[in-house]
Amino acid sequence: MFIYHFEHFTVRLCASAIIFSGCGSSTTSEVGAPNAAIAIRAQGRSTARLLLNVKALQGELLYVTASPNGRNGSAYVYTYPQGRLVETLTGFAQPFGECADPAGNVFIVAYSNGSMTSSTIYEYAHGGTSPIATLNDPKTALGCAVDPTTGDLAASGDGVAIFKNASGNPTMYYSSEYRFYYCGYDDRGDLYLTAVNGHYADQQVLVRLASGSADFEQITLNAKLYSSNSIWPTVQWDGKHMAVTSDPYLKPISLYRLRITGSNATVISSASLSSPMNDYSGETWIQGTSIIGVGHAKPRHYEAAFLWPNPGGGGMPGRTIKKAGATRYPLVSGVTVSVAQ
């Protein structure tokens, strides 16, 4: 007998192909009864699917959040990079950005109970079907990031909420000058954020909240960061450099890798995420040498995830995951990858 422990229950799989009572079930079917063969075949198929999902949960998982009409959002969980749907998480008022920590825990930022004045961050274990924790942000947030040096969680939006060890009540940081969007930590624990300062509606700036500081500092960048159609620049550490996206109107998304010295940032490489057959609508995620974006796959506008597997990350996506949840015209906003431990 094979026993697999998952969440709060235990699944038992019978080693024998035919056991009259099933795996501890209370069925009264007897051999030779009309439904006995059907029940045995169904049990075999169910067991095979369960074994397949158990194997899938041992690998990397891709999480994509979407909200039909901005309500009743879900997170769709896929094997990565294969793209097989293994779970659908529900119960979000409207989810936005996502992030994952080195232990494989996934954080999903959403409005609190339909309220547009505060946010809830849901934490899931790798492959988990129920939250293992919920965190309350008194302001609205869009993105999140985990500090690799401390395990602290940051949520960015109307302010920046820092949850020590990703738990408890946050320490809040506010700015009268910036409205924040997505965020990402570097390897030293400095938090970088994309923000708008009110001067240009379609242009963003890069801001830093240095480790141990309570003051925001704008970073001078030798490239312009654009946002269009409610797509805001994503910022993330790629293992060597900070990377940030730019989405000019009616043009491909550009991903810039930066060299940052003091308060100045220089683009050292760029990639154009291009696909005329698709629309983009949310954040991007860097996983190793691959880049993942989310949006709508034309012509029917089903939510989708797009993977650029080449190191440069440019050109047409190498793989598209279509029909996440088979819902048309949703708001697709968040993406992250969870690594199994």
Image (cartoon, rainbow, N blue to C red):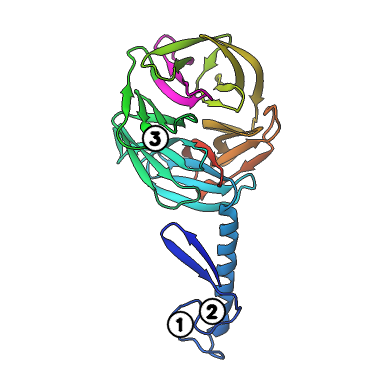
Q: Which residue is mark 2?
A: 39
- Crowding near the residue tagged with mark 1, few <14, some 14–19, many ≥20 C-alpha atoms within 10 Å: few
In space, the residues marked 3 and 2 are separated at their CA atoms by: 48 Å
Q: Which residue is mark 1?
A: 27
- Residue 72: % across, % down: 38, 45
- Whether the magenta-drawn stretch holds residue 201 is answered as yes
Quarter of image, res 161: top left
Q: Nearer the viewer, mark 1 or mark 3?
A: 3
**Circle 3 SS class:** helix
In-front residue for pair 316/258:
258
Magenta-highlighted residues? 180-205
Q: Is residue 92 visible?
A: no
Q: What residue is rendered at 60% in x and 28% in y?
A: 239
Q: What residue is rendered at 52% in x and 48% in y?
A: 77
Q: From the viewer's perspective, is 109 left or right of 265?
A: left
Q: Which residue is mark 3?
A: 165
Type of the residue with mark 1: Thr
Earlier in the chain: of badge 2 and badge 1, it is 1
**Circle 1 SS class:** loop
Image quarter in which the N terminus is found: bottom right
Type of the residue with mark 2: Ala
- Crowding near the residue tagged with mark 3, few <14, some 14–19, many ≥20 C-alpha atoms within 10 Å: few
